């Protein structure tokens, strides 16, 4: 899946989605006459440019789905949002979200309960395109994702969980939005169907659109996305080009490096401890209690800062010698792959 030239060709154009210092809190009752605010997302920053797939990765419970709901304007009434969200250069206000939702901004939700249980799935997918063209497009998408033709006459409860996820994905791709927010779109799909979904997202982005992919599947994010924002305990701790995940030394934050080491091909190593609950957030760095390089300086305020071609919320000074070695190794590996391809092509 060739993603670099496509994304770079749009890099100078205006961003589709810009999120700056986004915080989300929930007001919760505490006793009969008191309430308290629970911070679930804090100071989040992420941008989706034209032609890009940007993935947000993190463990379950880190607040990824709440971020998707915040973008779509479907958070519960007790939620409070601060910070800035811009879509195509203009503020994404509540009124504007209502006008754009399902048209210029489409959601692939994580839960299959978004489907109407009393309406046949084919009619739901075609709801915004009821004519012949809508019927043709729906059949095309169902066929692409391995859904039998008779599926369109079924109700959601007559379909498996994996089928319903593919139906939701088809619904998002029916329209011609500028931005797709995909919240865990591939569980329940086999490898071929998941790859097809990612290829469709890439084709969608290549037309000057954007995809905001929310997932806990780091290998999927690395293979599909142009950039990856790493989410931990309700905030972004790093944003990096997906190519940086070729080597641990190219990554910036200890948590991102821990995720890299946890992948099967990198040793399947776990780190002690658990992600903190929103009521028990540590001071300073949210990863501090689990970080092997924690110091007292980590107890202060830690803003995002630019490091090479990414950003990180960490005060660590990285070993530039190891970074240079990792880059040289990656370049050498790429050159070797190119030589193998040329050798194969010349021998045909």
Image (cartoon, helix red, strand yellow):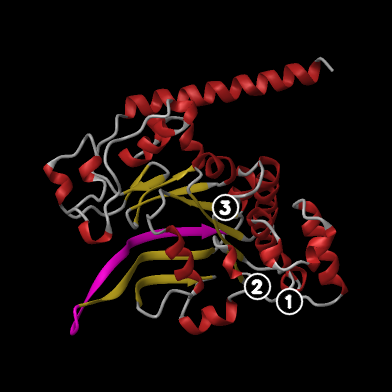
What is the number of the mark on residue 127? 1
Earlier-in-chain disc, 1 versus 2? 2
**Secondary structure found at label 1:** loop
Q: CA distance from mark 3 to mark 1?
A: 27 Å
Do residues under tags 1 and 2 come within 8 Å of each other at their CB atoms? no
Q: Which residues are magenta?
A: 31-49
The image shows residue 131 at horizontal and vertical percentages of 84, 77
**Residue marked by disc 3:** 53
Q: Is residue 43 above or below residue 186?
A: below
Give the residue at x 52% y 59%: 48
Q: Is residue 32 magenta?
A: yes
Label 2 environment density (alpha carbons within 10 Å; few <14, some 14–19, many ≥20) = few
Picture quarter with the N terminus:
top right
| Spot occupied by residue 85 in the image (x, y as percentages of width and height) | 44, 70
In this view, the residue in front, 136 or 342, is: 136
Residue 92 lies within the magenta run? no
- Residue drawn at x 68%, y 66% is 156
Residue on which the image places disc 2: 117
Q: Residue at x 26, y 52 (%)?
A: 276
Determine if residue 1 is in view: no
**Disc 3 packing (10 Å; few <14; some 14–19; many ≥20):** many
Q: Quadrant of residue 128?
A: bottom right
Q: For marks 3 and 1, give the one nearer the viewer.
A: 1
Residue 320 at x, y = what percent? 32, 29
Furthest residue to the front? Answer: 158
Secondary structure of the residue carrying numbered label 3: strand
The residue at the point 72 percent across, 68 percent down is 155
Q: CA distance from mark 2 to mark 3?
A: 31 Å
C-alpha distance separating marks 1 and 2 = 15 Å
């Amino acid at each position: 899946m060739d993603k670099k030239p496509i994304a770079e060709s749009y890099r100078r154009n205006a961003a589709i989605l810009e999120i700056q210092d986004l915080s989300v809190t929930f007001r919760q009752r505490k006793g009969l006459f008191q309430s308290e605010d629970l911070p679930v997302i804090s100071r989040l920053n992420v941008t989706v440019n034209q032609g890009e797939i940007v993935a947000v990765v993190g463990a379950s419970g880190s607040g990824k789905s709440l971020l998707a709901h915040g973008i779509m304007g479907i958070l519960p009434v007790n939620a409070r949002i601060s910070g800035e969200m811009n879509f195509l250069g203009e503020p994404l206000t509540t009124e504007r979200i209502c006008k754009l939702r399902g048209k210029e901004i489409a959601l692939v939700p994580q839960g299959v309960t978004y489907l109407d249980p009393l309406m046949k799935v084919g009619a739901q997918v075609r709801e915004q395109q009821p004519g012949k063209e809508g019927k043709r497009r729906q059949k095309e998408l169902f066929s692409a994702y391995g859904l039998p033709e008779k599926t369109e006459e079924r109700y959601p409860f007559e379909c498996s969980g994996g089928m319903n996820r593919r139906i939701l994905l088809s619904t998002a791709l029916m329209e011609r939005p500028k931005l797709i927010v995909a919240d865990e779109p591939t569980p329940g799909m086999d490898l071929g169907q998941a790859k097809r979904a990612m290829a469709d997202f890439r084709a969608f982005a290549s037309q000057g659109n954007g995809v905001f992919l929310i997932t806990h599947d780091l290998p999927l994010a690395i293979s599909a996305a142009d950039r990856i924002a790493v989410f931990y305990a309700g905030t972004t701790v790093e944003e990096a080009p997906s190519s940086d995940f070729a080597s641990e030394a190219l990554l910036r934050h200890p948590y991102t490096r821990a995720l890299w080491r946890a992948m099967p091909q990198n040793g399947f190593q776990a780190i002690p401890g658990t992600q903190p609950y929103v009521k028990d957030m540590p001071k300073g760095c949210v990863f501090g209690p689990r970080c092997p390089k924690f110091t007292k300086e980590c107890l202060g305020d830690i803003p995002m800062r630019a490091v090479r071609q990414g950003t990180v919320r960490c005060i660590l000074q990285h070993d530039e010698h190891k970074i240079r070695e990792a880059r040289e190794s990656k370049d050498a590996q790429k050159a070797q792959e190119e030589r193998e391809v040329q050798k194969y092509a010349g021998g045909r």
